[in-house]
């Protein structure tokens, strides 16, 4: 750039940019909105091709017909009627799909309550008790590293501990607390909940921690000075201000557990029915419309839960 | 507030330590168990110490064709990492201005993150089946399938890694001082020069973080791969297949090998980030100020 432009530049940066643009090739003459499209377009295309269109196909296929080995592209409600088979006839007892969703919601609630408790206090410790930034970084990293390793490995890692001859059982037998190994430790509801908590507390810790570090420390001091007890400060100051993080973490955990079929499969010994597992079973039986119908139902329920929760907080504002 | 440590500090410190033990304890148990002696079983106590099971894995006499699955997972992981970094940085830059469809992209990313993986996976598999049927019906009767590691598989992984990449970009630019770019522009830098010599060096540590997420999330991905990967398996799928059948420490050995790759990548990435941060601090400029 020469001197005259420098001077011009001080007077009006936009003008110089204009003159530069005129000089340069076509590429530089692009309008800002076109550049935005170039930058964001590829990601949008990926979501379009591998997320949005597939979702549309799930909905469409859920209304198709099927036989033993193939899809029949003709309108049919069979995917749904097969799913709800016997639901009216068996009243007042719950039909299979009803029981499955009840089970899934029960697992969801247990995992949510436990991850919230653990996540809240871990985040609280990191945000308020760890004063040095370096330590805060180091300890957060310590919590994050397992997230970068394999979920399946973290599941099977419980087998040597909880199995019939595992550490826990042999320890309990040795100390004489029990005579026979406990059977419910592994491949049970207990091990499913344990593994889900183990895997996904991370999703609770991060958003709650993010909300908590943004809390102005002087607010807590003010509460303290005004005579609030530690408990009162917690309930009236910290929890309300950490609410966005709590809600975001809860949405993550609940949606993950609602759709999970791998943890429930591996840790439940393939014996526990869950919403995600129905879809997998139907796919394995090549009953795609039925699988799709179940996916639509699961999606609707998940969407309902998220809508209810996001009433409490504006997600976009918090990120 | 009082000076010194309140009692709650100690209670929570113990709670935190217990949580960390809960996180790492079981993992460490299987790493140890994968070094069982040849007669060793799935649980403690150790029956001798050896590298028998790990060696067995590499000899290919085990249950899975480890070598092929390993190479496939590695290839996919590296491609996912590169695409995630490039697309996330580009889209992150776009979000600094207002543009049409901004909120569509944002909500697509969030939805992609929280819609259960099995649904996304099923959708992709249906999409590719329908494409296959169309090709068979209209162009080529002998066409096999368009599903595969680098088509449907890659797409499935990207729906999982891109939202993380985009959210990290948001976090970066929330703390980014736009005056640095203005200064570069005022000195006559072109938009590309501004990005290449000012923005990129400052955000580089976090960009490596995006790469770390991209690779590790793909390397361990299971739920989205399950329906969408096509005929071949990735390493985690093989591992999951083993959980129902295996009765000897092969599976732990495989777990240890997979984790070794993860930990190598994590160490490399964190080491690089550390060096870059050190260098930014040492260069004495305030360019990195406000960045961690």
Image (cartoon, helix red, strand yellow):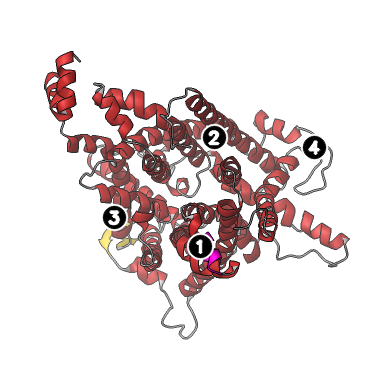
Of residue A273 and residue B189, the one placed in the foreground of this image is B189
Residue bearing the label numbered 1: A222
Q: Are marks 2 and 1 in contact (CB under 8 Å)?
A: no
Tag nearer the camera, 2 or 3: 3
Viewer-nearest of discs 4 and 1: 1
Image coords of residue B227 (percent x, y): 44, 49
- For residue A56, the mark is 3
Chain for numbered disc 2: B
Using the image, name the chain to which the residue with label 4 belongs: B
User: Which numbered mark, 2 or 1, is in the foreground of this view?
Assistant: 1
Residue A222 is one of the magenta-drawn residues: yes
The residue where tag 4 is placed is: B38
Q: What's the magenta bit mostly, secondary-structure-wise?
A: helix
Which of pointers 2 and 4 lies earlier in the amino acid sequence?
4
x and y percent of residue B107 in the render? 32, 52
Label 3 Cα crowd, 10 Å radius (few <14 / some 14-19 / many 20+): few
Mark 2 lies on residue: B69
Label 2 – label 1 distance at C-alpha: 59 Å
User: Is A78 positioned to the left or the right of A96 in the image?
Assistant: left
Q: Tell me the magenta residue range.
A: A220-227
Tell if the residue under mark 2 belongs to the same chain as the one under mark 1: no
């Amino acid at each position: 750039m020469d001197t005259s432009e420098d001077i011009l530049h001080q007077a009006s940066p936009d003008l110089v940019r204009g003159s530069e643009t005129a000089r340069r090739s076509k590429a530089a003459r692009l309008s800002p909105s076109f550049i935005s499209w170039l930058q964001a377009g590829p990601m949008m295309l990926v979501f379009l091709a591998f997320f949005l269109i597939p979702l549309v196909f799930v909905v469409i296929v859920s209304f198709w017909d099927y036989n033993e080995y193939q899809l029949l592209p003709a309108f049919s409600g069979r995917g749904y009627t097969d799913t709800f088979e016997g639901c009216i006839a068996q009243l007042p007892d719950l039909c299979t799909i009803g029981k499955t969703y009840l089970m899934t919601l029960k697992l969801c609630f247990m995992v949510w309550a436990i991850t919230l408790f653990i996540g809240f206090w871990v985040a609280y410790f990191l945000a308020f008790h760890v004063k040095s930034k370096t330590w805060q970084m180091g300890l957060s990293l310590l919590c994050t590293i397992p997230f970068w390793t394999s979920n399946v490995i973290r599941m099977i890692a419980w087998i040597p501990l909880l199995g019939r001859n595992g550490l826990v059982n042999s320890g309990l037998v040795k100390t004489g607390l029990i005579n026979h190994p406990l059977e419910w430790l592994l491949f049970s509801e207990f091990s499913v909940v344990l593994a889900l908590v183990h895997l996904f507390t991370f999703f609770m810790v991060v958003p709650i921690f993010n909300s908590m570090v943004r809390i102005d420390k002087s607010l807590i001091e003010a509460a303290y000075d005004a005579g609030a007890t530690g408990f009162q400060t917690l309930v009236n100051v910290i929890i309300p201000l950490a609410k966005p993080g709590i809600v975001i973490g809860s949405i993550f955990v609940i949606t993950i557990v609602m759709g999970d079929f791998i943890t429930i499969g591996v840790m439940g010994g393939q014996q526990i029915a869950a919403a995600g597992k129905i879809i997998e079973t139907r796919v394995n039986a090549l009953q795609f419309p039925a699988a799709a119908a179940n996916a639509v139902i699961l999606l609707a329920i998940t969407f309902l839960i998220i809508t209810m929760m996001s009433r409490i907080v504006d997600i976009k504002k918090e990120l | 507030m009082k000076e010194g440590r309140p009692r709650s500090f100690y209670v929570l410190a113990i709670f935190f330590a217990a949580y960390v033990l809960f996180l790492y304890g079981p993992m460490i148990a299987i790493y140890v168990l994968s070094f069982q002696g040849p007669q060793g079983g799935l649980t403690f106590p150790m029956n001798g110490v050896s590298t028998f099971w790990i060696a067995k894995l590499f000899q290919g006499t085990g249950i899975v064709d480890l070598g092929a699955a390993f190479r496939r997972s590695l290839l996919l992981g590296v491609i996912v990492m590169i695409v995630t970094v490039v697309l996330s940085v580009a889209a992150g830059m776009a979000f600094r201005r207002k543009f049409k469809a901004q909120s569509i992209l944002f909500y697509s990313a969030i939805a992609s993150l929280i819609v259960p993986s099995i649904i996304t996976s099923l959708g992709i598999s249906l999409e590719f089946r329908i494409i296959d049927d169309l090709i068979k019906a209209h162009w080529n009767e002998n066409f096999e399938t368009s599903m595969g590691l680098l088509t449907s598989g890659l797409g499935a992984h990207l729906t999982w890694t891109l939202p993380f990449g985009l959210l990290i970009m948001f976090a970066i630019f929330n703390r980014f001082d736009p005056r640095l770019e203005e200064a570069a522009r005022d000195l006559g830098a072109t938009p590309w020069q501004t990005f290449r010599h000012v923005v990129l060096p400052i955000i580089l540590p976090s960009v490596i973080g995006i790469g770390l997420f991209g690779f590790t999330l793909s390397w361990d991905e299971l739920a989205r791969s399950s329906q969408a990967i096509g005929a071949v398996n990735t390493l985690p799928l093989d591992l999951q297949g083993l959980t129902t059948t295996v009765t000897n420490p092969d599976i732990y050995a495989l777990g240890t090998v997979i984790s070794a790759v993860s930990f190598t990548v994590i160490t490399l990435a964190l080491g690089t980030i550390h060096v870059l941060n050190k260098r930014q601090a040492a260069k004495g400029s305030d360019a990195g100020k406000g960045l961690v």
